[in-house]
Image (tube, grey):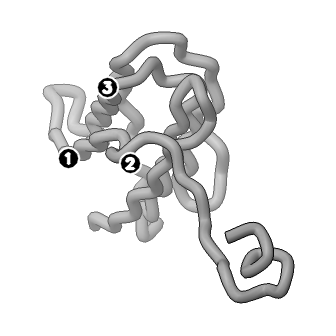
Amino acid sequence: VLQLSEKGYLHSNIVKGDKFAEIKVQAIKKLDGNVYYSISIKDEVILKNVKITLNDEEKVNIDVNSSEYTTEIVLQKGFDNKLIIEASNENLTTSKKAQCSLP
C-alpha cells in the first residue's frame, strides 16, 4: 500500500465523523410585523463555531461549545434575504452550509 501511495495510485480524502450538523430554518412572522429566520443547529458532537450571513452581511460568528444553537434574525425588506449558515464541530471536521431565499 505504501508503494502504491508513493507512486500516486492511491488517493483519498479523510473525513472524521459521519454526519453533518443538522440545520433547520423557518420563516416566522411576529406580532411586531417583521419576518424572522428562526435558526436551529444541532450536532452529535459539540458545535465549535457557527457563522451566519444574511445578504452578504455577517450577522453571527460565535464560538458555541454546545451541541445545540438557536437564534433569530430579522429579514430585511427590499432584499432577497439570502441566508448562508456554516457550522463546525469541536474537531473542526464536520461542517455544513445551508442557503435559502425567502421574500
Front one among 3 and 90: 3
Tell which circle, 3 or 2, labels the residue nearer the N-terminal end: 3
Q: Earlier in the sequence, mark 2 or mark 1?
A: 1
Q: Nearer the viewer, mark 2 or mark 1?
A: 1
Q: Position of residue 27 (x, y in %)?
A: 20, 47
Amino acid type for the residue under numbered disc 2: Leu
- How far across and down, in percent of the image, does residue 90 sit? 57, 23
Identify the amino acid type marked 3: Glu
Residue indicated by mark 1: 27
Which residue bears the numbered disc 3?
A: 44
- In the picture shown, does residue 68 fall above or below 33? above
The image's mark for residue 75 is: 2
Q: Residues within 10 Å of mark 3 (few under 14, many from 20)?
A: some
The residue at 41%/35% (across/down) is 73
Residue 57 x/y as whole percent = 65, 51
- Residues marked 3 and 2 touching at CB (< 8 Å): no
Residue 60 picture quarter = top right
